[in-house]
Every structure is written in structure tokens, then in C-alpha cells.
């Protein structure tokens, strides 16, 4: 008979020698029976709860191809511990006319599949429950329940009896500086895609050791994934947010979101990387750019998720019926109800280009004040100085790491001289040399000395920026994040019909931009504003601002 030997060990028996022991015992049995061994199939460190194993899949393929007469294994649970999977495997082998024999149970029959399959399934459930209890105890003690987040190093210590103490973490300062920079950039309006491109351009590797991607940064706020949503960065450890179950169709694990009352949360202030100010700033921005719920039955689809074509698209409302102003011709917007249903009396149409120009001219003209210039200089200086302080800290961290790598390489060389075979150290040396080359390149780019802090006299820079504001925002190719900042200052723009048979429509701007223009107007009393007189602007300011009315 042609025999195939299958061996497997999983996470509950972490020894490569276990595979060889299983094969040796099965080989002895095959030789005793006089069987011809035509193949050995093995899976290393893979759970028996899944059939997605390369070794078992090759065994099934060869059995169905008629290359095997008998499958020999140490025990039935080596083939699978899942009740449904072992039953399906047994049916396939019977179809291929292949016998299953194990050293523990002997020839496998329907009775074995029913009883042993149930026992193995119960074993898996019991093992999972014990594992969860152990992990929960570790979490209750303020330790990690497994895995390691970007920004931290695993602390490897041993108890007095020599057993490893698991779950301790410490902050990796080099990675922590990168995390802080990501939070600052996102809070300042930079998109995850742009942040990822910048990090990759600097040669900084991502959490997986590969290039950064947008999803690595923005993740999923509801699931707590992604750099921007990891609460460990504010000193809060959350466990049991997700659970994983096996899809019976594919055999793959699928994550499910647990209700919040099942979460286990512990404060770990010694692991805090991000302060509350930056964390809240990121959460606020995430709430403004969130796509919201999206299902196949939702009315919100592509049209609500695409980038606005015009600066104020979707913000213009009718002052009579409250409905949206939609595009009714190539250049004009008008009330949808008046246009399509005839249920609104507001027949006023408006050129979007004229509306954009009017608001932007007002913003541009009124921002040329000494008070706003000082605010800009202070904020610009603070922002640039923070960036440079972060760069200097990163450079110092890189230099310290380089010193450590050089010491590690020296010790490895000493070990080789002392007689340790070079083959055992080759991979470690190569990894250190690669990391050293990356750090050397970064340190060289950052300069020989820390960059000086910026002097706060930035008046000319501010005036130039304001001068370019209108043309920058009117340009359809302008960076979407820049246009989004201006849009975020506006709740809505309400268009009213002309008063007293006049020609100019009355425009209400509601939102933070109204407050900005109100303050601007107060600081420029007596200043004659130039620009189009197409519309009269009435500002509906936010809390803390007095409404202001002026004609542009």
C-alpha cells in the first residue's frame, strides 16, 4: 500500500521536534506494515481549527488524484480539531477510497469521526476559554494581552524561577516621534495619503516593516485600528474590542465588533505618547471628514462621498424654502424646488464663480490687518518651531540608535572571533547593517547640527499668502485639503431673493467664516472694500461674535 504521513504541531505545542517525532513514529509503523511511503506532509505552528494549511491541502490533492492508499497520522486531532472539517476530510478520503489510520485510534471509522470530532471541538473551546481568562488577567494587571503596537518595544524579563514574564511594554522614542508628527500633520489638515507619501519619501518604514499606506494611518475609528485611533497612545489600553469567528464557507477568521460594555479598559499612563490636545484635534477633524454609514441600501453613495467640484458645492441653500441650490445650467445654481417642482417662489439664480469671488475678495481684503498679521506670525512660528523640535528629537534618537547598533555589531564580531559560527549570526548582522544604512541616510539628510528656531518676523510671508488666497482657492486643481479647510468654516450659504425689487441677492453666510469676517470688519472700520457688488453679505456669526452686515 502507498502510505502518506501527515504531521502537525500548533501553538499549544511549540516544538519543531514534535514534527520529526510524529514522522518517526509513523514511519516505524509503515515499515512494520510493509507500506511504501510515497509522501510526507507537515504543517508547522498552525492551529488544527482551520483547514487552510498548505500541508493538509497538498495531502487532499494527492489523495483525490489517486496517488495515496492510506493516510497515516499520530492522532486524529493532528488532521483537524474542527468537527465539521474532520467530517469533510473523512468524506473526501472515503470518496477517494483512501483509508485513514492513526497511531492512537487505529483505523478511523464513522464512530471515531462522531465521538473524537466532538471531543476535539470541545477541547478547542476549552482551550480558547482558558486562553481568554489568562489574557484578561494580564490586562487587569495593566499588561499587554498580545501583539505589539507601533511605537512600543516588548520588554523581555524573567521571573525568579526563569519563566518569561509577558505583557510588559516600553515606549520606542524614535517611533513615538513619528507618531506625534502624524498626529500634528493630520490635525493641521494633511490627508493620510499625503502623510504616508511624506514618510515613505523620508525612508521611514511602516509598522509592518514595509511602506506606509493611508489605511495604516486612518484605520477604522469604530474598531480602534490605525495610528490615529490607537487609544494606547493616550495611555488607555482597550481589550476585547473585537472577537474573531471562523467563516464556515472559507475557513478564514472574520472579525466582529463587540459591544462597548464588553470592553476591558485600563489606564497605562507610562505608555502615553500623545497629549489630549492633539488627540482631541484629530478626533474633531475625523468627525468632519467622516464618510458616515454606507450600506447597499443607503441613499448616501458616490454623490455624497466625492470631492466637491466647486468650493461651496453642497453648502448653498434657498432662503425661502430651505432646499438646496443645485446646478441648473453650465454656470448657474438655483433653488431645486423652484426649478423642478414650482413649489418655491425664489427664482433667483446665481453664478457660482461670482459667489466664490465675492466671498473670497471679502476674506482677502479684510484679512490685511495688523492684528491678524500678528496672529499669523505667532501661529506660524509655533507650528514651524514644533516641527523643528520634533526633527531635532528624531535626529537625536537616530544618533543614539546608531551608537547602539555599532556596539551590537562590535559584540557580534567579538562573538565570531570567540568561535561562534558566522552562519548563526549572519541574519542578525545583515539586519543591523540595513538599519544602520537607513539611519545614516536620515541623519545625513537632517544636517550636521540642529536647525535654529524660526524668528517670528513673518509679515511679508503672510501678506503674500493672503494675496494668493483668492486665486489659490478658485483654482479647481488646488489641493483638496486646502479647499476643505475653507469649507469647514462654513455651515451653509443661504441665498435670498433681492429686496425691494433690487438686483443684488442677499447672502447669509453661517459658520466660523462669518465670525472671522465679522472680526475683520471690526478691525477695518472706515476701510473701503473693493470688489463686486453682486450680492449683499449678511454674516450669521457663531457664539461670541456679533453679526455684521456689509456690502461687497
Image (spheres, rainbow, N blue to C red):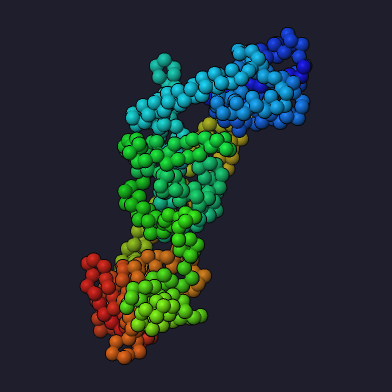
Number of marks drawn:
0
On-image quarter of the C terminus: bottom left
Q: Position of residue 22 (x, y in %)?
A: 63, 16
Q: Position of residue 393 (x, y in %)?
A: 42, 47
Looking at the image, which is closer to me, 496 or 344?
344
Looking at the image, which is closer to me, 538 or 1?
1
In the current view of this chain or complex, which residue is farthest to the top? 32
Q: Which residue is pictured at 41% across the width and 28% down the height?
A: 132
Q: Which residue is pictured at 36% across the width and 46% down the height?
A: 274
Relative to residue 279, is residue 127 depicted above or below?
Answer: above
Q: Is residue 270 left or right of residue 131?
A: left
In the current view of this chain or complex, which residue is farthest to the bottom? 501
**Which quarter of the figure has residue 525?**
bottom left
Looking at the image, which is closer to me, 525 or 268?
268
Q: Position of residue 311 (x, y in %)?
A: 44, 72
Confirm whether residue 353 shows in the render.
Answer: no
In the current view of this chain or complex, which residue is farthest to the front? 110
Looking at the image, which is closer to me, 95 or 391?
95
Relative to residue 357, is residue 200 depicted above or below?
Answer: above
Q: Which residue is pictured at 43% across the width and 30% down the height?
A: 155
Q: Is residue 129 left or right of residue 21?
A: left
Confirm whether residue 532 shows in the render.
Answer: yes
Q: Is residue 81 left or right of residue 422?
A: left
**Which quarter of the figure has residue 387?**
bottom left
Amino acid at each position: 500500500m502507498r502510505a502518506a504521513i501527515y504531521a502537525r504541531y500548533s501553538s499549544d505545542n511549540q516544538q519543531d521536534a514534535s514534527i520529526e517525532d510524529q514522522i518517526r513514529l509513523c514511519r516505524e509503523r509503515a515499515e512494520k506494515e510493509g507500506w511504501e511511503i510515497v509522501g510526507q506532509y507537515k504543517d508547522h505552528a498552525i492551529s488544527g481549527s482551520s483547514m487552510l494549511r498548505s500541508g493538509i491541502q497538498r495531502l487532499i490533492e494527492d489523495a483525490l488524484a489517486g496517488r495515496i492508499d492510506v493516510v497515516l497520522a499520530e492522532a486524529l486531532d493532528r488532521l483537524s480539531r474542527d468537527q465539521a472539517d474532520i467530517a469533510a476530510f473523512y468524506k473526501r478520503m472515503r470518496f477517494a477510497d483512501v483509508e485513514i489510520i492513526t497511531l492512537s485510534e487505529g483505523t478511523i471509522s464513522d464512530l471515531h469521526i462522531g465521538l473524537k470530532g466532538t471531543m476535539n471541538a470541545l477541547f478547542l473551546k476549552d482551550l480558547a476559554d482558558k486562553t481568554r481568562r489568562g489574557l484578561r488577567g494580564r490586562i487587569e494587571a495593566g499588561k499587554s494581552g498580545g501583539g505589539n503596537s507601533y511605537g512600543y518595544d516588548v520588554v523581555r524579563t524573567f521571573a525568579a524561577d526563569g519563566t518569561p514574564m509577558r505583557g510588559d511594554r516600553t515606549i520606542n522614542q524614535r517611533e513615538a516621534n513619528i507618531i506625534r508628527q502624524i498626529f500634528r500633520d493630520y490635525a493641521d489638515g494633511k490627508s493620510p495619503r499625503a502623510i504616508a507619501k511624506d514618510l515613505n519619501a523620508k525612508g521611514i518604514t511602516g509598522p509592518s516593516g514595509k511602506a506606509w499606506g493611508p489605511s495604516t494611518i486612518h484605520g477604522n475609528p469604530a474598531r480602534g485600528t490605525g495610528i490615529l485611533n490607537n487609544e494606547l497612545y493616550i495611555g488607555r489600553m482597550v481589550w476585547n474590542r473585537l472577537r474573531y469567528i471562523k467563516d464556515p464557507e472559507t475557513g478564514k477568521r472574520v472579525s466582529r465588533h463587540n459591544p462597548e460594555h464588553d470592553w476591558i479598559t485600563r489606564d497605562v499612563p507610562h505608555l502615553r505618547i500623545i497629549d489630549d490636545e492633539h488627540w482631541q484635534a484629530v478626533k474633531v477633524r475625523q468627525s468632519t471628514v467622516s464618510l458616515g454609514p454606507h450600506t447597499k441600501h443607503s441613499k448616501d453613495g458616490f454623490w455624497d462621498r466625492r470631492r466637491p467640484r466647486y468650493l461651496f458645492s453642497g453648502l448653498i441653500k434657498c432662503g425661502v424654502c430651505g432646499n438646496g441650490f443645485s446646478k441648473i445650467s453650465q454656470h448657474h445654481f438655483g433653488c431645486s424646488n423652484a426649478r423642478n417642482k414650482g413649489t418655491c417662489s425664489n427664482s433667483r439664480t446665481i453664478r457660482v464663480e461670482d459667489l466664490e469671488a465675492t466671498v473670497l475678495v471679502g476674506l482677502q481684503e479684510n484679512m490685511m490687518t495688523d492684528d491678524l498679521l500678528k496672529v499669523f506670525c505667532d501661529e506660524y512660528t509655533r507650528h514651524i518651531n514644533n516641527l523643528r523640535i520634533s526633527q531635532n528629537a528624531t535626529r537625536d534618537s537616530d544618533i543614539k540608535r546608531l551608537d547602539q547598533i555599532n556596539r551590537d555589531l562590535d559584540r557580534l564580531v567579538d562573538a565570531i572571533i570567540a568561535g561562534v559560527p558566522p552562519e548563526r549570526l549572519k541574519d542578525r548582522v545583515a539586519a543591523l547593517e540595513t538599519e544602520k544604512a537607513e539611519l545614516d541616510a536620515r541623519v545625513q539628510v537632517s544636517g550636521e547640527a540642529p536647525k535654529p528656531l524660526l524668528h517670528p518676523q513673518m509679515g511679508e510671508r503672510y501678506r503674500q499668502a493672503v494675496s494668493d488666497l483668492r486665486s489659490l482657492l478658485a483654482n479647481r486643481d488646488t489641493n483638496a485639503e486646502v479647499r476643505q479647510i475653507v469649507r469647514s468654516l462654513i455651515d451653509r450659504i443661504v441665498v435670498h431673493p433681492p429686496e425691494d425689487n433690487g438686483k443684488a441677492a442677499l447672502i447669509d453666510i453661517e459658520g466660523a467664516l462669518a465670525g472671522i469676517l465679522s472680526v475683520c470688519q471690526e478691525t477695518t472700520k472706515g476701510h473701503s472694500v473693493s470688489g463686486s457688488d453682486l450680492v449683499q453679505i449678511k454674516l450669521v456669526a457663531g457664539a461670541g461674535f456679533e453679526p455684521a452686515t456689509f456690502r461687497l
